[in-house]
Amino acid sequence: MADYRIRPGGSLPDPDDQGLIQLKGRLFVNTEDGHVLHVGQDPDNGLFRAKLPGELKPSGPILLQDPFSLRWFSPDDADLIGYPLPQKRLEGFRTPLDFAGASPDSDGLHGFEGKRYAVIEGHAYQVMRDIDASSPARKVWRIVNSKDPVAHDTENVYRPSRAGETLGIVRDADHGWVSSRSGLLGGMPRTATARANIAHLLQRYEPIREAFAALQASDARFNELWDVAKHLPEGSDLERAELIGLEVHTLKHIRLQTEFVQSLIDNKDWLVMMKAGGVYKTELHEQQLARVDYLNKLLAIMDRRVYPSVALMTVDSLKGNLAHMNKKLRVLDDRQAVMDQVRKVSRSATSEIEELNRGIPGVDQINCARYNLCLRLLADDPTIPPPFGMRSYMAVNLFVEELHNVSGQSRPVVLQLALDEIRLEKGRFEDLLPALPTTKTPYLHEAMSVLGTFESRIDGQLNDIYARVNSNTEWPALDQDIDLDFVPQQSVPTATPSAPRKIFRTRQHGTYRVLVGVRQVDPDGSVTIDVPDPFKPQDPPQRYEKRQGEWRPMRSASPAASPPQLLGQATQLLARVDGLLDEGLAMESRKSNPTSIRESLDESADELHGLASRLESIEGIASDAQAASVIARLKAAGDSLSTAGRDIMVRMYKEKAVLDVLRLNYLLEHSQLNVIKIVARKQLGKGKDKSFLDVYSINDRSANTPLWEAHFHYDRQDRPALDYTVRGAHMKTLAQAGAGSAFQQRQEQAGLAHQPIWREYISPKVAQKLFDCASEPAAGTPVRQ
């Protein structure tokens, strides 16, 4: 090493993040003993060597790098065991245990609950015996993180195959703890002979080098197979055979990649010194990205192989496509695990990952397709989807394909309404299960599972949005207007420009939904929106127009029919009314979704009223007493169904065990509740935890019985009612009205099981409605303390 030391004529730049000094295209490093070396990479093995001035190929000793100090050393340097432990490196391994006053054993360790601990500068660290790195003269231990799998061994022995970061340590002559480079190298012997050390190091590296060579050969073979397959006629038997072979090879290549990356991770402790100057980190990053790339290639090959068989709209084709989608999800799960590892190491890798994934359908797109397939398999004819699932499919499609076009205050409301549609459909599916043939129940269960996935995704996004609210004025209004125009992203630059589209809110039967449609401007300047049926793209779209400030569906003209035909239809509809009412009550008893019950009855009511209007439009029908009687009966029957649907929904909205601000808002708007203030600015806590509480009892107006409570928290006693703390307003069930965080702490102190408290947060607009209709308790009524 002494022959390769240099004395720089001037000052050198500071080392970069990889410990390399770059000057005029040359590389220099600082050694652990304070000298400077000119270095270069050995073209045969990629390792850094010391270099003499003027050499093209470095001839000096192989150099390794300390991963913490980033200084360099030669494997033949003796007695380099014992450099100080880096405190920042130790912080992540610390445990809360305190062994002050306790005496260590003969190894300098403490025991607790079957584990062993080393105390370094007053902090306790769990350690495992590294048998491979130890020798009769010196025991090597590894500091481990108690949360990692590597820390869980009944014999307290370090197992390299188990995941988890470690740090090798030994005791020095003064019985203190220092780093063990021997431990980091897994017991690489240190002798005075540099040649023996280097040979041993290269011997350990040889399997990794061979694995990398096998990867390169496999990659070349993939390119050969793809060059053959891509030129074959699409859908031919020959193409299918080649694609099957290519898919099998790709799976084998992915296994090779996984094993190679795992070997890099398992041997990090010594590879990071051998592949120094950031080479190890760069190679690991590149290999992880290559895994993502090959998993994407696998998805593309799978799609091309199955496309000819799944493009048909038959039951067998749909079943095959559904199985194919589920296989793709498993591949995407593997890809996600790799991407998570990459992002954990490098946050800046997001753009690289996005570029690799461009054009590859993600989990949401796959689940949306699965839902479509399940709905078609539930139908008697897969080309004609069932009369359910449409609204939730449109909500799911909005979330997957169009949500990026919604921003600002509109986004949480759009998400909330999409969530309501999904929950509504799940309730309908639960009602369908008992009557469904056993051959179709698996598809309904899978459809419900997909909806549950989207329900969780949307709910998570809403929680994230609400967690960022810094002021009550930022809460979205549930009844705010949504009317957003946008131009869809063009598929390719030369494509015909897409028609302008609109995301809008429409109200039907007392409930809201969000739709996406194509914006149309008529010659007279009026704007309408065409919403295509995603299941029947060949059918005319539903058209919406703005009436009385809201987007409403335009009724399509009914086919012409004679008066006798219409009267016959009326007789049939009227005969069904009692059965419809009974079915509504039965759904109520089964705890079906209340909105679903109302919509079902309202749709039948619309049919009755529509038929009455068609009869009234017939010239001279008013003079026909029989027809007039039928018209009156149709209107009365329609009104009875509408009233029954509304009454059922109101009754179910008043369910005490369910907290739902949308239901509360509806009941307040329709004067179904009275509100009484029962607690006024009660002080809670002390000091910085002090707050003041108002409690309102929310009661059923007709029965005069309490349903829920609304709690409002304030930081000062004199705050106006609406100026409560952020996220400080929520509904609570009567059973948990008196339970709060203090109650949960008392439970925990008493050793009782944790009891979650259900809080449904109230937006300022709903809170104002509560305050507007609230009254003080009657004279003599005790106020709760």
Image (spheres, rainbow, N blue to C red):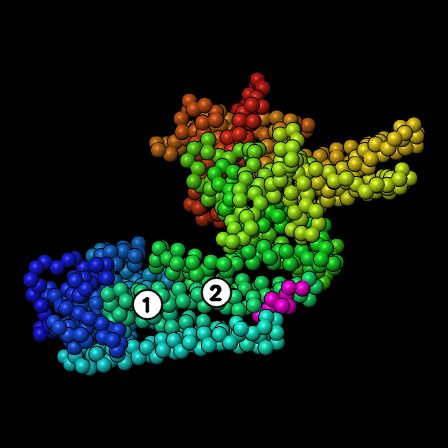
Q: Secondary structure at mark 2?
A: helix
Q: Could you tell me residue 639's position as x and y percent?
A: 78, 32
Disc 2: which residue:
296
Q: Amino acid at mark 2?
A: Asn
Q: Amino acid at mark 1?
A: Glu
Instruction: Work out how far the residue at label 2 is from the one at label 1, CA to CA, in angstroms.
Output: 20 Å
Residue at screen point 40% across, 26% down: 716
From the viewer's side, name the closer residue of 87 and 432. 432
In this rendering, would 112 be left or right of 601?
A: left
Residue at screen point 55% across, 21% down: 776
Callout 1 crowding tier (Cα within 10 Å): few <14, some 14–19, many ≥20: some
Q: Could you tell me residue 124's position as x and y percent?
A: 27, 58
From the viewer's side, name the closer residue of 695 and 639. 639
Q: For residue 308: magenta?
A: yes
Residue 701, image quadrant? top right
Sooner in the amino-acid sequence: mark 2 or mark 1: 1
Disc 1: which residue:
283
Q: Could you tell me residue 505's position as x and y percent?
A: 60, 38
Q: Which range is magenta?
A: 305-312
Residue at screen point 26% across, 73% down: 46
Asked if residue 211 is positioned above or below residue 90 in the image, the reply reads below
Q: For residue 690: magenta?
A: no
Asked if residue 770 is positioned above or below residue 340 in the image, the reply reads above
The disc label shown at residue 446, or none = none
In this rendering, would 688 be left or right of 697?
A: left
